[in-house]
Image (cartoon, rainbow, N blue to C red):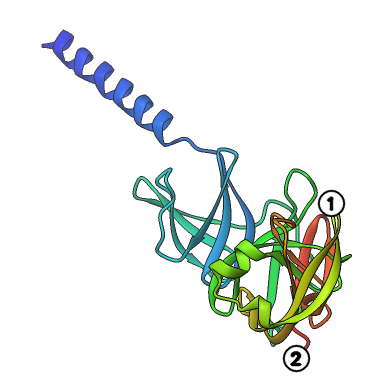
């Protein structure tokens, strides 16, 4: 009787250990916005909206721009950005988006162009938003109707078209009628968020965290 009890106890301990080992994941918050978050799960970045589940089984329950509530194996936990954020910079009346830098030191964040989901790389050296023609076509942008211009790319000078985007948003920070350049080549390979948008918001870097804040 005692031996049977000990055997069952050992099996329960092994099962508990196995369950904990399976559910153990390295999860960090890279970006927070209301209704969405960029999570890094075991080294892979996953952009999730409220109610979405990552391929690793991480459910984003909610995100309010300050913390993300996630659920893994039925257990919920509130996560904030991994680095400290100053609390005396913002006011309650203004919309703020916080973006953590990637391993390469870049700031990458999900956003929207004309209401469609995209991924931006912050580029304070770019005059305006820049994208290639393939991305523009996927977003339904009639770039050939824009003003022909010349732009510098990694392969030299190339023809591009200046267009006006109806709306550009990161989280709740939405701006309208934003200038963008669409390259006739496949460069840039990512959408660069330039100063035609960034010039309309306030920016501050605090301990590696980029804070974008509305002006009104």
For the residues labelled 2 and 1, the Cα–Cα distance comes to: 37 Å
- Residue 19 image point, x, y percent: 35, 31
- Residue 121 image point, x, y percent: 73, 60
10 to the left or right of 133: left
- Residue 116 image point, x, y percent: 53, 73
Quick one: SS at disc 1? loop
92 to the left or right of 60: right
153 to the left or right of 4: right
Quarter of the image holding residue 150?
Answer: bottom right
**Crowd tier of the residue under label 1, counting other residues whose Cα lies within 10 Å: few below 14, some 14–19, many 20 or above:** few
For the point 81% across and 74% down, which residue is it?
Answer: 128
Q: Which mark is residue 165?
A: none
Q: Which residue is mark 1?
A: 154
Closest to the observer: 209 or 80? 209
Closest to the observer: 89 or 58? 58
Residue 167 sits above or below residue 122 on the image = below
For the point 83% across and 56% down, which residue is it?
Answer: 207
Q: Quadrant of the N terminus?
A: top left
Residue lying farthest to the top in this orientation: 3
Q: Say which label, 2 or 1, has the lower sequence index.
A: 1
The answer to whether residue 110 is seen in the rendering is: no
For the point 34% across and 50% down, which residue is it?
Answer: 74
């Amino acid at each position: 009787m005692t031996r049977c009890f000990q055997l069952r106890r050992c099996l329960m301990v092994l099962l508990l250990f196995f369950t904990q080992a399976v559910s153990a994941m390295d999860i960090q918050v890279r970006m927070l916005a209301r209704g969405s978050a960029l999570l890094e799960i075991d080294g892979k970045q996953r952009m999730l909206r409220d109610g979405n589940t990552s391929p690793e089984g991480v459910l984003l329950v909610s995100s309010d721009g300050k913390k993300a509530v996630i659920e893994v194996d039925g257990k919920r936990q509130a996560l904030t950005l991994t680095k400290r954020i100053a609390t005396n910079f913002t006011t309650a009346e203004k919309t703020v988006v916080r973006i953590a830098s990637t391993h390469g030191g870049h700031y990458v964040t999900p956003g929207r162009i004309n209401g469609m989901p995209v991924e931006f790389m912050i580029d304070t050296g770019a005059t305006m938003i820049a994208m290639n023609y393939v991305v523009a076509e996927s977003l339904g942008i009639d770039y050939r109707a824009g003003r022909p211009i010349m732009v510098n790319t990694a392969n030299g000078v190339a023809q591009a078209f200046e267009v006006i985007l109806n709306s550009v948003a990161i989280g709740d920070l939405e701006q309208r009628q934003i200038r963008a350049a669409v390259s006739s080549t496949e460069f840039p390979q990512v959408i660069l968020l330039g100063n035609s948008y960034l010039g309309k918001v306030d920016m501050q870097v605090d301990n590696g965290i980029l804070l974008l804040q509305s002006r009104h």
